[in-house]
């Protein structure tokens, strides 16, 4: 029987900048009430810490008794029993309506989302306090504080009304609407928010709506509680989950805040076997080896049945040049402004631009690597194991050294994105020792010489010369197949860390 794992990705949908002022105020008011409710339940659970830690006894199927902590659902039931007035208990000890009057009439699912947030925060704070209490006096630091919440509003999937998406192409299409239940100042009611849905998100949400309808029909036909659970989890369709409304400061938008909806999408995939098990089962399996660098962000090669089937180079010189120019401007402005003020971010816009450049390059490179692996049927992607950064020995300017460091950090960002994107497709990532990868000839296995970006083999009968990053990619594959031969001791000094 195949084992399934769940993978998640998030799509972002922007709320139209021309959203009405009343709707913007409703969003702000809902967020304030939501955080007030979270703060109320944080105080409630902080006063009932014994409920979080007290073990409860449950009976297993074989009749034995075991102890465990209360689940989130049990804690949620406990909180609602003591804070909400019902016919069974009209006088709760901690009435929510008295402490947060605006929460009266709050949608049940929205209130439960706030309770779950409070449970997570109090549990984290409680564990931090316990660790602080047992720590040695010299290493304690400040006592952990519970703090006040400032969380974006989370709407469960059942609270959101998506439109019927039309996937037929239309030339003039401004926006569509998504309905959420917000507090308009007088009461809680549905508010239609104009959103700008890009084509990829529209296709995902349309497929999610069809999948939910199919699951609902299957559950309706079946009378059991576990209706069709095996087939539902085995589908390869993304399903939309809880939606979160984020607000980001942006002077270009009315009110100085730009709103967006973040929708996590979930699907189940077959859990891949460990990479070493796959290699032992099929030594000639398709594999993609990737050498990450600075001037070339990635040099990737697809090996099929032990032979190099295709290669691809991702150039990074334009990115390095642009980043270096921005860093030079930052250092020049720092020299003009004199001593920096403590706690004040200098050149915030320029630093944001540099971070956005690096993040965008990492995402695009990772997407290119995963698509390349899918195209050639690879189930494993081989990288170098990144070590601690060491500054270069040659002389560089301040901006040059900073640019060199950020180019090295970019490799780690690329690997993180590849690891996440590849696992969604059932592809694993592994790392190998980078020693001698760009200094040994991949054909005759003789130690060569690297000058800049060029590798030259020292074997007089071979005379092989190639790009050093390409040689590194070839040797990474040799290390995956365990056919790489390290130079003997004394042949050459220990290689410098990349």
Image (cartoon, rainbow, N blue to C red):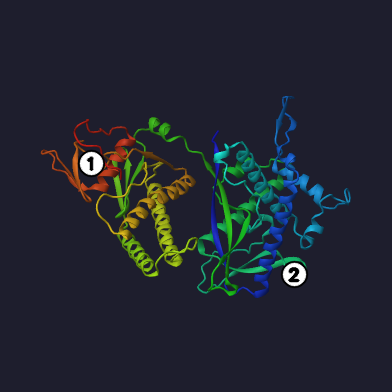
Quarter occupied by residue 75: top right
Which quadrant: the N terminus?
top right
Q: Nearer the viewer, residue 71 or 12?
A: 71
Task: Tell which residue pokes out farthest to the left in this image.
Answer: 460
Quarter of the image for residue 384 reads: top left
Res. 439 mark: 1
Q: Please give the label number shown on residue 307.
A: none
In the image, is 123 to the left or to the right of 436?
A: right
Q: Is residue 279 visible?
A: yes
Q: Quadrant of residue 132?
A: top right
Q: Residue at x 71, y 46 (%)?
A: 221
Does 386 appear above or below 160?
above
Q: x, y percentage for residue 400?
A: 30, 58
User: Mark 2 sits on what residue?
Assistant: 185
What percent of the width, then of the height, locates residue 137? 58, 38
Please give left or right for residue 349 compared with residue 432 in the image: right
- The foreground one among 285 and 7 is 7
Q: Is residue 498 left or right of residue 21?
A: left
Disc 1 is placed on an element classified as loop
Q: Alpha-carbon neighbours of circle 1 within 10 Å: few (<14), some, or many (≥20)?
A: many
Q: Residue at x 46, y 65 (%)?
A: 348
């Amino acid at each position: 029987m195949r084992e399934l794992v769940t993978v998640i990705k998030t799509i972002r949908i922007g709320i139209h900048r021309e959203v009405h002022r009343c709707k913007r105020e409703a969003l702000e008011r809902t967020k304030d009430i939501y955080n007030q409710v979270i703060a109320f339940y944080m105080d409630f659970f902080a006063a009932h810490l014994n409920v979080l830690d007290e073990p409860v006894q449950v009976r297993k199927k074989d009749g034995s008794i075991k102890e465990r902590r209360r689940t989130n659902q049990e804690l949620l039931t406990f909180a609602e029993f003591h804070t909400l007035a019902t016919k069974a208990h009209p006088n709760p000890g901690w009435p929510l309506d008295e402490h947060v009057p605006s929460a009266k009439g709050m949608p049940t699912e929205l209130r439960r989302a706030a309770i779950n947030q409070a449970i997570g925060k109090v549990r984290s704070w409680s564990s931090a306090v316990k660790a602080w209490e047992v720590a040695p006096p010299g290493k304690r630091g400040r006592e952990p504080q519970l703090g006040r919440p400032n969380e974006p509003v989370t709407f469960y999937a059942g609270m959101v009304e998506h439109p019927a998406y039309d996937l037929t192409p239309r030339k003039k299409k401004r926006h569509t609407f998504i309905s959420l239940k917000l507090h308009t100042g007088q009461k809680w009611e549905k508010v239609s928010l104009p959103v700008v849905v890009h084509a990829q998100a529209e296709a995902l949400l349309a497929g999610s709506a069809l999948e939910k309808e199919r699951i609902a029909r299957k559950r309706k036909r079946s009378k059991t509680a576990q209706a069709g659970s095996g087939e539902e989890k085995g589908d390869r369709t993304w399903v939309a989950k809880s939606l979160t409304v984020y607000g980001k400061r942006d002077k270009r938008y009315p009110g100085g805040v730009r709103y967006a909806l973040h929708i996590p999408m979930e699907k189940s995939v077959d859990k891949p076997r460990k990479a070493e098990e796959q290699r032992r089962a099929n030594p000639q399996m398709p594999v993609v080896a990737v050498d990450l660098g600075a001037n070339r962000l990635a040099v990737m090669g697809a090996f099929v049945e032990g032979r190099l089937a295709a290669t691809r180079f991702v150039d990074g010189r334009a990115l390095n040049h642009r980043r270096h120019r921005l860093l030079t401007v930052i250092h020049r402005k720092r020299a003009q402004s004199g001593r920096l003020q403590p706690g004040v971010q200098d050149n915030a816009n320029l630093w944001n631009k540099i971070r956005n450049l690096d993040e965008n390059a990492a995402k695009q490179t990772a997407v290119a690597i995963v698509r390349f692996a899918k195209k050639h049927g690879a189930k494993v992607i081989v990288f170098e194991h990144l070590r601690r950064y060491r500054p270069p020995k040659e002389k560089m300017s301040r901006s040059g050294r900073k640019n060199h460091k950020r180019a090295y950090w970019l490799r780690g960002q690329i690997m993180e994105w590849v690891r996440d994107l590849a696992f969604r497709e059932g592809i694993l990532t592994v790392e190998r020792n980078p020693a001698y990868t760009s200094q040994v000839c991949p054909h005759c296995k003789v130690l060569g010489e690297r000058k800049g970006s060029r590798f030259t083999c020292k074997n007089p009968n071979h005379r092989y010369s190639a790009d050093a990053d390409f040689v590194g990619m070839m040797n990474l594959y040799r290390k995956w197949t365990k056919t790489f031969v390290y130079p003997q001791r004394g042949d050459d000094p220990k290689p410098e860390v990349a």
